Image (spheres, rainbow, N blue to C red):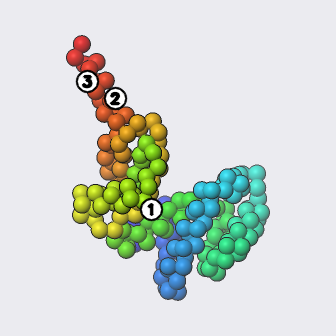
Amino acid sequence: MSVSSGLSGRYAKAIYELAEEKKILTKIVDDFMSLKKLLKESDYLSNLIKSPAISKSDKQNSILKVLNKAKAQKLTTKFFGTLASNGRLILINEVIDDFLSEVSRINGEVKADVTSSFTLDQDQQKKVVAAISEATGIKKIILSTSVDESLIGGLIVKIGSKMIDNSLKTKLNRLEIAMRGTN
């Protein structure tokens, strides 16, 4: 298991091993993905988790209510309850990311973060996945997209620590630097 080192990695490793042992890994992955989406969409929940003014027990009660309402697996609920009672709920996003990254790695999947100047539709996303797959030889690509209108055009693709910046903004910046150097 090669999750990131550090506290979040150790928590991710623990929940991974328990889920695998209980043969409910797929269900736990679904819970984690749902919680990640909820945290991204709910400023209230994110602020509640980050706030030092809210007690550990209040954070624990809140996260347990959210997970129970979402009908999360008992293991997921216990896990995040423990995370909260240990005062580590602030690590929730890192733990979720470490856990999901490890599951993807074991399944032979690679996450590609793609930033474009506009929202990519399904057909464009499929073409990007096909191009990345062809360029890297990796068959299972998990695409994560974001929009940065300042790019003007083109894409920025990040796979792990590698980045390919083919944006018009970067090309224009390079041209400007090159033209300044010729004076």
Q: Position of residue 84 (x, y in %)?
A: 67, 65
Callout 1 amino acid: Ser
Q: Is residue 137 above or below residue 52?
A: below
Instruction: Confirm or deny contact between disc 2 and disc 1 (CB under 8 A).
Output: no
Q: Which residue is mark 1?
A: 5
Which mark is on residue 173?
2
Q: Is residue 103 above or below residue 118?
A: below
Element class at badge 3: helix
Q: Which residue is mark 3?
A: 178
Mark pair 2, 3: CA separation: 9 Å
Q: Quadrant of residue 170?
A: top left
CA neighbours of label 1 inside 10 A, class few (<14), some (14 to 19), many (20+): few
Question: Which residue shows up at 45% across the image and 45% down it?
Answer: 118
Element class at badge 2: helix
Q: In what quadrant of the picture does the N terminus appear?
A: bottom left
Q: Is residue 113 above or below residue 167?
A: below
Between disc 2 and disc 1, the foreground one is: 2
Residue 65 placement, left or right of 8: right
Question: Which residue shows up at 29% across the image and 68% down it?
Answer: 139
Mark pair 3, 1: CA separation: 41 Å
Question: Which residue shows up at 36% across the image and 46% down it?
Answer: 156
Question: Which residue shows up at 28% across the image and 57% down it?
Answer: 131
Q: Residue furthest left?
A: 182
Mark pair 2, 1: CA separation: 37 Å
